[in-house]
Amino acid sequence: MAGIGIILNPKARSYKHNPGRMERLGFIVGDKGSCHATQDVLDVEALAKEFKEKDIEILGISGGDGTNHVTLTTFINVYGDKPLPKIAFLRGGTMNNVANALGIKGLPEKLLANLIYKYHAGSEFNTTEADLININGKYGFLWGIGVISRFIEEYYRSQKKTPLNAGKLLVKFLFSSLFHTGFILRMCERFDAKVVVNGQEWAFKNYVSLHAGTIETFGLHFDPFHRAREKAGFFHLIGMSAVPRHLLIGFPWIFMRKKVPSENYIEDIASDATIELEYPMTHQLDGDVQPATDRIIMKTGPRLTIIIS
């Protein structure tokens, strides 16, 4: 075993605003060959091949949710049938919903220092397990199309991509739903879709949103996936066919991580699903907007062992 391999994304928000943090990460590792900054997917692929050959025990990823899903997708493709090493999410990006949901908190330097210390001390790590979702060959924890994807795109249009601005956008969304303004009508534009889950076609034909997760939260205490970790090898898939004002009814239940008692919601835990859209639409995977498509094939990806502390 070759120990720990660290990949960090220098384009992540934490490093853009604090470039010296990259140097501190390298200093904490203590070995220039152990901490790798990546500029694009080709860099990640080259490192995945190197780490596979060295048979690393732990893969540390420093960046946000988008960095995590791009890195994991690349490593899964490179590793093939070989199991991935333990994963350590070191945060550092614009969105850290996955780390937050799993209880991973702190600055990247502190997380990495603790990881290195416990590894060399031979201490036992506190770990959990979580499944990935395979969406048309890409892997992540959170997916959405319709209102969820449009919310993410609207957030990325803001000059400062911070939790505060995300919260302001959510408040705008709620008030717009209440007063039925043009903003919410645009966000909740309906679409037709045929959805087949675990081999059974859903009754709904028209939606404002379809979204799925293997962790509970989209962030900002918006936690729709109360069944996300109910059963290993499954993800929680939800469809909404509500008018904007009816969406407000569901928010208290979502914040409490409970099923929304409404005939406008349909949901199930799934090992696989196929979505056929009337026309190509963009969708989001772990906060990254994906190219428009009219067919989405979903299935449970590999199950990861994730270091919490």
Image: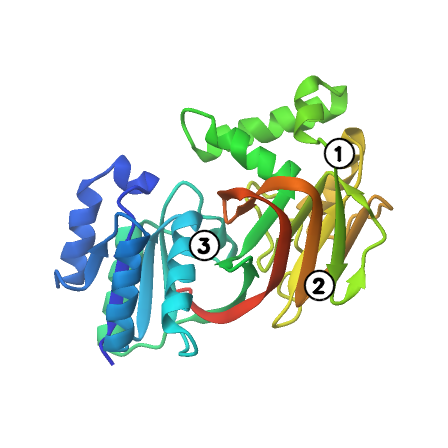
The residue where tag 2 is placed is 269
**Helix, strand or loop for disc 1:** helix
| Coordinates of residue 167 in the picture (x, y in percent) | 54, 31
Mark nearer the N terminus (3 vs 2): 3
Q: Residues within 10 Å of mark 2 (few under 14, many from 20)?
A: many
Residue designated by label 3: 99
Residues at badges 2 and 1 in contact (C-beta under 8 Å)? no
Residue 204 shows up from this direction: yes
Give me the disc on residue 248. 1
Drawn side of residue 247 relative to residue 98, left or right: right
Marks 3 and 1 sit apart, C-alpha to C-alpha, by 27 Å
- For the point 66% across and 21% down, which residue is it? 183
Amino acid type assigned to the residue bearing label 2 in the image: Ile
- Where residue 68 sits: x, y (%)? 41, 55
Q: How many numbered badges does the structure rendering display?
A: 3
Q: Quadrant of the N terminus?
A: bottom left
Looking at the image, is 169 positioned above or below residue 275? above
Disc 3 or 1, which lies upstream in sequence? 3
Q: Residue furthest bottom?
A: 1
Separation of disc 2 and disc 1 at Cα? 23 Å
Which residue occupies 87% across, 46% down?
263
Looking at the picture, which amino acid does disc 1 mark? Leu
**Secondary element type, mark 2:** strand
Q: In the structure shown, which secondary structural element does the residue marked by tag 3 occupy?
A: helix
Task: Select label 3 or label 2 by which is in front.
Answer: 2
Q: Name the residue nearer the viewer: 212 or 19.
A: 212
